[in-house]
Amino acid sequence: MQRIAKFEKVSLAQFTEGWRDIFGTETGAAASYEQLPLPRRATVGSAGYDFSVPFDLELAPGQTAKIPTGIRAAIEDGWVLLIFPRSGLGFRYRLQLNNTVGVIDSDYYYSANEGHIFIKITNDSNEGRILALKAGDCFAQGIFTPFGITEDDDADGVRDGGFGSTG
């Protein structure tokens, strides 16, 4: 296996900014930040690194939540981190990522927001199931994969942000 990336926490200040955006207050941010685990694989054969929710969360069918993970990823050039719902949650609750698949590029790490990975999810259950997660529960998984570029590629832009930052 190639070792091509490293997970880190964003700074407490950056996490608190994301927390404030979600909750409108800083209350609870520092305590949640201290408890954040870095994403990990559950088994030697696992492809996915599990991301944990930093707070208790309950989503009724059709409800959406934006999750500040507090995590960033230093990724080698030529690789990308793809984010998916955990398989079991997708199967039981039709848990969906609002952008279908999260794409974390290697240059996102250097953005002004420290490359803070946010994951927006929706409980798309059509069986009336309420999704309940406790702080620390794993809800998404990230998989590193290589990518290629075209022979005539001439990209020279510089990223500074997430959604919409590259045009």
Image: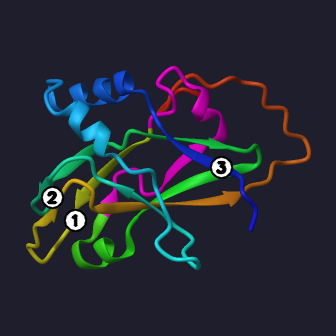
Is the residue 24 above or below the residue 87 in the image?
above
Q: Identify which residue, 13 or 101, lies in the foreground.
A: 13
- Give the quadrant of the N terminus: bottom right
Q: Position of residue 131 (x, y in %)?
A: 15, 65
Query: Which of the 4 quarters of the picture holds residue 47?
Result: bottom right
Crowdedness of circle 3 by 10 Å Cα count: few (<14), some, many (20+)? Answer: some
Q: Quadrant of residue 107?
A: top right
Residue drawn 16% across the image and 74% down it: 126
Q: Which residue is mark 1?
A: 124
Q: Amino acid at mark 1?
A: Asp
Residue annotated with mark 3:
5
For marks 2 and 3 on the same chain, the one whose residue lies earlier in the sequence:
3
Residue type at the position of mark 3: Ala
Q: Secondary structure at mark 1?
A: loop
Left or right of 35 on screen, residue 85: right
- Say which of marks 2 and 3 sits in front: 3
Choose between 113 and 36: the one closer to the eye: 36
| Membership of 144 in magenta stretch | no
The number of numbered discs placed on residues in the rendered structure image is: 3
* Dot 1 and dot 3 residues touching (CB under 8 Å): no
Left or right side of 136 for 5: right
Checking the image for residue 154, the label placed there is none
Task: Say whether residue 81 is left or right of residue 28.
Answer: right
Disc 2 marks which amino acid?
Gly
Measured in 3D between alpha carbons, the distance from the residue under mark 1 to the one under mark 3, in whole angstroms, is: 32 Å
Location of residue 108 in the rendering, given as x and y in whole percent from the top left corner: 58, 34
* Region rendered in magenta: 96-116
> Which residue lies under the disc numbered 2?
62
C-alpha distance separating marks 1 and 2: 5 Å
